[in-house]
Image (tube, rainbow, N blue to C red):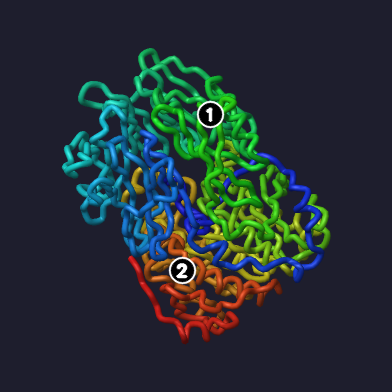
Amino acid sequence: MHRLLLASAITIALSACSSGKADEVPADAKAATPTSLEQVELIPREALFGNPERANVQLSPDGRYLSWVAPLDGTLNVWIAPADDPSAAKAVTRDTARGIRSYFWSYRPDTLLYLRDSGGDEDFHLHAVDLASGESRDLTPFEKTTAQVVGVSDRHPDTILVGMNDRDPKWHDVYRVDLGSGERTLVEKNDQEISGYIADADYGLRFASRARPDGGEDLLRRAGETWEKYDEIPFEDGMTTGYAGLTKDGATLYMRDSRERNTNALFAIDTATGQKTLVHEDPRADIGGGLADPATGKVQAVAVNYLREQWAVLDDAIRADLERLDAIGPGEASINTRTLDDRTWIVAYSAAESPVEYYRYDRDGKGGGELTRMFSGRPALEGKPLVPMWPQELTSRDGKTLVSYLTLPAHADANGDGKADRPVPMVLLVHGGPWARDAYGYSSYDQWLANRGYAVLSVNFRGSTGFGKDFTNAGDGEWAGKMHDDLIDAVQWAVDTGVTTQDKVAIMGGSYGGYATLVGLTFTPDTFACGVDIVGPANLNTLLSTVPPYWASFYKQLVRRMGDPETEEGKAWLAERSPLSRVDAISKPLLIGQGANDPRVKQDESDQIVDAMTAKNIPVTYVLFPDEGHGFARPENNKAFNAVAEGFLSQCLGGRSQPIGDEFKGSSITVPTGAEGVPGLAEALQSHTQEVRK
């Protein structure tokens, strides 16, 4: 998780991206494409950014229960139903604040687990719900503690392994926790600064990793009561090499490994002999997701995502099943859960122009496998004018390939070939991380912006992950440098190919994307017409001095890639690459969104640049949410901010805008400065009653 230093706030705000597998568009969609923006139905923000009707659908390991996340009195909670009767669902959690999104089943009968923080502070506590009694118990009831699940095993259904940092905020000790009583028993006191553990199915800690001062990692294995080093990961492989799992018999350790190569490959290592066997590789991209046999832990298939996600089957036992899922449609079918006996799967399917749909797949069904559609995650979007996403391979000024994704408004691509019929305003949507990537799939943000009349371009600039270590490492020392040049080159491509015009491009992004927005308006102020920054850092020195304490294991790698604030040279470099140092250059409209409880990019980052702009009489609109963290998780807040952003972009680029209306209802939105900069904002605030939830 630490590699996503500045994880995309747009992702956190439930954009719900999914991947797909083909570029074709249904014939009826092509025929219905309008030729003017006015002919395109306006999709309400509520349909795009409100609570999903259902999300994160799972089956219990024994196959008895179907579960999902859905609203209860407007707040997302976990619901369960008999597997054969979804209509009999009932809520088993009662959150009334930010909602619950992350949950999973234990192997203890009638017990599921969920994670919850407070106000976006990312101090996630692990809770257990007993379905028989309805009782919910906090398994990590300690202040300033972030739970890390280390092991869940069907061999020991009544307990789990959990890492807790209540003793030392920098390091997680490992405990065995009883799911019934909540009692914890110390398994490992982490006094060796270990960053992560790999446990076997009997909860033995078998392997671990530990950061080195040079930014690399030592790989450790158990030797009696101590740990011994058996291998190491050089700094340059730190983003692309690491443990990928252990089979239940403990005989095979899986690793994604980029050492002595560029893209990482999946290897299987015999834990007794150390023999290393190549499982799968792809010269275009790194190994991504995988499927493992629920009974043995053996990897059966792996995914590689270059332009689109592609699966490689490693075990013929599931080949026919994956082929059956592949036939659902041109999008991507992913497997949410598999029962312990592997007879029943829950499948999620979506494409760029199709939000997620959920299927039940019975492997013993008719014809060797029966697929039953259950429901859509967002039925309000069915029949709405959603548009395709087109993968692109752009070229940077120094010859690097930048995998990118273009979404065109329906009226600008009448024949549906992915090429603009006319130039339209464009939003450059920059991903967070920066050690993450953009991918093909449904995105509420892309669809929203396209529906309002904008082309949307997302670029995997150097430093992005997934395309091999050389591409990722090319971003080292290039914040506001070549990483930004890649974005500028992509804008120029869009102008040269007729997607947009030079004077009608906005830049927008969350987290690192917010930083890129601030860089765009300070380092290249003539390139963009305006910018929307969501939880982006303005001062890299203060950013690095305030990272959460439990990022200690990643800190050395972080400063080697960015700059070291503990050296004079590093401090000067970080200051030079900070947008705060160039506030005088801002000449275009800027909208900033921030969560007051953000533990990664603290409120002070936005406050600093807002204060500096205000002192110099440079206009800025600043939106602050007192009950949000690194992104806007509450749909009420997400809709509120996007209502502001929509009016802001309309004024800047000329696209259409749905009035704010009652979109602030239930939101904690505040606007400390600049309300007059967005049409209708000041008026909407006058009638708004703030609602804070933590």
Q: Check disc 2: other Cα within 10 Å, few if <14, some if 14-19, many if 20+.
A: many
Q: Amino acid at mark 2?
A: Glu
Relative depth, front residue between 81 and 310:
81
Disc 2 from disc 1: Cα separation = 42 Å
Which residue is disc 2 drawn over?
636
Residue 161, numbered label: none
Picture residue at 32% right of the left edge, 38% below the top: 106
Label of residue 365 in the image: 1
Q: Point out residue 622 in the picture as x, y percentages from the top left corner.
A: 49, 75
Residue 86 or residue 206, whichever sits in front: 86
**Tag 1: amino acid:** Gly
- In the rendering, at what x and y percent does residue 397 appear? 72, 49
CB under 8 Å between callouts 2 and 1?
Answer: no
The answer to whether residue 670 of the structure is visible from this angle is: yes
Mark 2 or 1, nearer chain start: 1
**Above or below: residue 96 compared with residue 225:** below
Q: Nearer the viewer, mark 2 or mark 1?
A: 1
- What SS does tag 2 mark? helix
Q: Residue at x 63, y 47 (%)?
A: 351
